[in-house]
Amino acid sequence: MLYMFGFERYGVVISDLYFVDPNPRHGQRGPERGVRLELRVLERGALRGSIYSAQPIAVEQPIWRVDLLESVDGPVGSFDRAHHHPTLRNWEPGRRVFVDELSADPLGWLGSQLSDLDAVLNRAGAPQHEADAADAVALRERAPEILAAVTRLLDGIKAGALATPPGGESPKSARVGWL
């Protein structure tokens, strides 16, 4: 399942995820499931037809990523592998950053981050853009809707309908999900 919330310059993309880290850290072995949220740059393309044609919109460079993950072998809702990537470079995430508050209260932590776009962009080292202030207001106003979408995905995972392993494939290198 994939959700997207678009603003002037940035978009928030959210999906369920089943993941096996090919190079796990100590204590992080085995499949993971959960929700991935990314802050991405949106790029509007030139019209491909008349002035009435739909405008192409590309979901481009990731700026920040949050993974509300838990080990598949553990209890649902443990968030024992929840982390974020404050910086991404050339589409690649930096190391996982574990924050106690993120595992203890994932939605509360995520809501506070979504309400402070300036801080997220500063930590990411993102260049300033003229749309940042308007997007910060819009993101803060839409944070409850974004958190509701995250909650729906988490409920689907709890029910066993989302973030499931690929059918018939080896889970050794599986990555299932949109993001």
Image: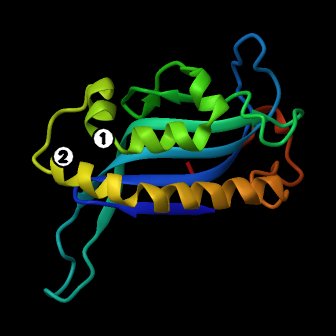
| Mark carried by residue 132 | 2
Residue flagged by tag 1: what amino acid is it? Leu
Question: Which color scheme does this rendered protein use?
Answer: rainbow
Residue placed furthest toward the left: 130
SS state under label 1: helix
Residue flagged by tag 2: what amino acid is it? Asp
Q: Are marks 1 and 2 in contact (CB under 8 Å)?
A: yes
What's the residue at 58%, 31% (across, down)? 102
What's the residue at 74%, 58% (across, down)? 155
Q: Residues within 10 Å of mark 2 (few under 14, many from 20)?
A: some
User: Where residue 14 sits in the image (x, y, percent)?
Assistant: 53, 53
Left or right, 123 with respect to 67, comes to left
User: Where residue 67 sits in the image (x, y, percent)?
Assistant: 59, 37
In-front residue for pair 144/72: 144
In-front residue for pair 112/53: 112
Left or right, 171 with respect to 15, comes to right
Q: Quadrant of the N terminus?
A: bottom right
Task: Name the residue tied to disc 1.
Answer: 117
User: Where residue 17 sits in the image (x, y, percent)?
Assistant: 67, 47
In the image, residue 47 above or below residue 100: below
SS state under label 2: helix
Q: Is residue 151 visible?
A: yes
In-front residue for pair 76/125: 76
Q: Earlier in the sequence, mark 1 or mark 2?
A: 1
Residue placed furthest toward the top: 26
Quadrant of the rendered image containing residue 8: bottom left
Left or right, 96 with respect to 153, comes to left
Quadrant of the rendered image containing residue 59: bottom left
What's the residue at 32%, 24% (across, down)? 123
In-front residue for pair 159/143: 143
